[in-house]
């Protein structure tokens, strides 16, 4: 049972989430079947739906985007992503049939990170995806907290020193989700499903218990875990007007 919980945790935190915006069912099937064990896919053929998905708290790591879609040109979505402060860190790879130089230039001018022509090699696309994802850091920063997503570590920074705060795996999942969505209110029911999953028989009081633990362990931080009667929980960084997150940073 313990090993199953660990596997769930690793998948939740580590599996990169891909938004595939593609109206060709064959391409959808090829990618989800070939890469489904390595990436978690969300698939849509609609630019409008893709915009809604990318704007929700779902930790999309990379976007694979076709140009010609039923409701418009994929370039508009790419521009939206790159013009939005909270989204521009997300790499966008165009996957399209046109090999014309002008089309490639238009995509790169819109902010595209890469361009792959159909027909394509799944292995080449995967390599390009991994190359783009390498440039993303896996750390989150607030005023005086640093979170390392690779080692599942949380550090408090005080007076030029850095000390580790020991969180359980569940506390870490809950903490990361809340600070990645700082300022947003989440009900106990939502958090219960998001963090504990639907298969575990626990009630919503377990959320209160874990929030209490986080408050106690992080009381020296500038983070404030706010309980809103009848609504749920949210976290804010009292040291900043908005939570600062290091979304992307070139390695080296």
Image: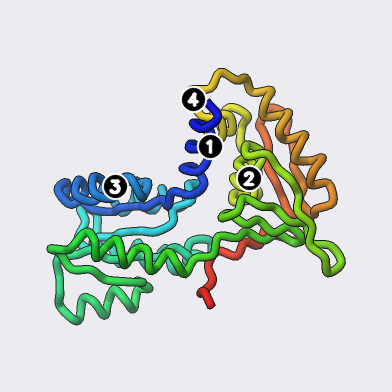
Q: Position of residue 217 (x, y in %)?
A: 79, 43
CB contact under 8 Å: marks 3 and 1: no
Q: Residue at x 48, y 22 (%)?
A: 199
Percent x, y of residue 79:
38, 68
Q: Secondary structure at mark 1?
A: helix
Q: Earlier in the sequence, mark 2 or mark 1?
A: 1
Mark on residue 178? 2
| Quarter residue 95 falls in | bottom left
Query: Would residue 129 appear left or right of 202 to someone viewing this image?
Result: left
Q: Which mark is residue 37?
A: none
Can you tell which mark lies on residue 198?
4
Residue 130 versus residue 97: which sits nearer the camera? 130
Of labels 3 and 1, earlier in sequence is 1
User: Would you call the spot at circle 2 few (<14 residues within 10 Å), some (14-19), or many (20 or more)?
Assistant: many
Image spot of residue 7 (x, y percent): 48, 37
Q: How far is the residue under mark 3 from the one under mark 1?
A: 30 Å
Closer to the eye: label 3 or 2 = 2
Q: Which residue is mark 3?
A: 44
Q: Residue furthest right?
A: 159
Looking at the image, residue 107 lies above or below residue 67: below
Residue 33, quarter of the rendered image: top left
Question: In the rendered image, is residue 153 in sight?
Answer: yes
Distance of mark 3 from mark 4, alpha carbons?
24 Å
User: Dot 2: what SS?
Assistant: helix
């Amino acid at each position: 049972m313990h090993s199953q919980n660990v596997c769930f945790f690793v998948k939740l935190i580590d599996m990169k989430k891909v938004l595939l915006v593609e109206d060709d069912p064959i391409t959808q099937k090829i990618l989800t079947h070939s890469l489904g064990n390595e990436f978690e896919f969300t698939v849509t053929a609609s630019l409008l739906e893709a915009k809604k998905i990318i704007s929700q708290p779902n930790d999309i790591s990379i976007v694979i985007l076709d140009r010609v879609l039923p409701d418009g040109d994929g370039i508009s979505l790419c521009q939206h992503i790159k013009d939005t402060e909270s989204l521009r860190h997300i790499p966008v790879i165009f996957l399209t049939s046109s090999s014309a130089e002008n089309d490639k230039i238009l995509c790169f001018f819109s902010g595209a990170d890469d361009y792959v022509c159909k027909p394509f090699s799944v292995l080449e696309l995967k390599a390009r995806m991994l190359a783009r994802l390498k440039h993303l850091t896996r750390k989150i920063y607030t005023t005086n907290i640093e979170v390392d997503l690779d080692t599942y570590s949380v550090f408090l920074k005080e007076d030029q020193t850095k000390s580790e705060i020991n969180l359980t795996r569940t506390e870490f999942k809950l903490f990361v989700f809340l600070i990645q969505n700082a300022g947003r209110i989440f009900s106990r029911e939502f958090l219960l499903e998001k963090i504990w999953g639907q298969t575990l028989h626990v009630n919503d009081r377990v959320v209160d218990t874990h929030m209490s633990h986080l408050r106690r362990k992080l009381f020296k931080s500038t983070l404030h875990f706010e309980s809103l009667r009848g609504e749920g929980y949210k976290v804010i960084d009292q040291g900043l007007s908005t939570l600062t997150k290091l979304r992307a940073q070139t390695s080296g």
